[in-house]
Amino acid sequence: MHASQIYIYALVQGITELFPISSVGHGVILPYLFHWTSISGSKQFLPFIVMLHLGTALALLIYFWRDWVDLISSLWMRKPHERRILGLIIVATIPAAIIGKLLQHKFAELFPNALSASIFLIVNGFVLFLADRLRRRRASKEIQQISYVQSFFIGIVQAFALIPGFSRSGITMTAGLGTGLSYEESARFSFLLATPIIAGAGVLEVPKMLKSNSSVMLHLGLVGGLLAGIVAFLSTAFLMRYFSTHEVKALRPFGWYCIIVGVIVAIMALLHLHF
């Protein structure tokens, strides 16, 4: 991989993992647009992707460090609200982790190309429009007010993010808004839930990364992970401020982005197949 490719992948990862526009979908579309199709098939690509995800998870952990201190300390201190939120995160993580482990490779085999990613990116855009309608119809709750059943459901729908084009943060925010959370609270729960999911997925791949015996790729992965982490931290800060100041149609700009980019890439892919 060239330095420019590392920087582009890291920047895209840091933004799209938190913005509701599908990091997996962009991971499929990006090499297609730049004709980097040989990169994703390389054995050296794995360490790089692992480090990008770990960098993103670290950024989330740093941004929400006060929340995590309160959540963990609630195990032995009297903090009922924080203890309930921790329980909700655990309940939502279980189905997401199980489904992800069982179906991740199957989804990758079923939807491996830019055309399918672009189609699901368009669908993701319409899901975000639906999320805005759900927000307008319901009163706002705080995270600790949702039920464990609702939290479990959020964990289940999170599995849609395994399909390139569906956004993990987008689908979990949509489900959160459907339970009555505000934009800010649904984003906060989505990002708190993302921390163990992204970190766990990265840690599981570390043994494979170490077996690759590629010190050069490991070094490049560290650089990419650092850059992705910085961008992810800035993305999180921007989104939390954005959702705290927008009460109506906050997801619509991201929905339009998904639809426009999806349509453009789909047309390009169809023309490529035709000719």
Image (spheres, helix red, strand yellow):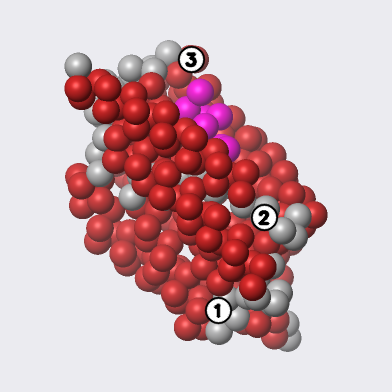
Q: Measure how far apart labels 2 and 1 are at the Cα level.
A: 30 Å
At mark 1, the secondary structure is helix
Q: Nearer the viewer, residue 166 or 209?
A: 166
The mark that comes first in sequence, 2 or 1, is: 1
Q: Nearer the viewer, residue 153 or 199?
A: 153
Q: Amino acid at mark 3?
A: Ala
- Could you tell whether 218 is left or right of 275 in the image? right
Residue found at x 39% / y 69%? 156
Q: Amino acid at mark 1?
A: Gly
Answer few, some or many: residues within 10 Å of disc 2's Cα (few below 14, many 20 plus, some between 14 and 19): some
The mark that comes first in sequence, 3 or 1, is: 3
Q: In the rendered view of the protein, which quadrant contains the N terminus? A: top left
**Residue 161 is at least partly visible in this image:** yes
Q: Tell me the residue that label 2 is attached to.
A: 249
Answer few, some or many: residues within 10 Å of disc 3's Cα (few below 14, many 20 plus, some between 14 and 19): few
State the image quarter where residue 27 is shown: top left
Residue 47's spot in the image, x, y percent?
37, 34
Disc ID at residue 3: 3
Q: Tell me the residue that label 1 is attached to.
A: 87
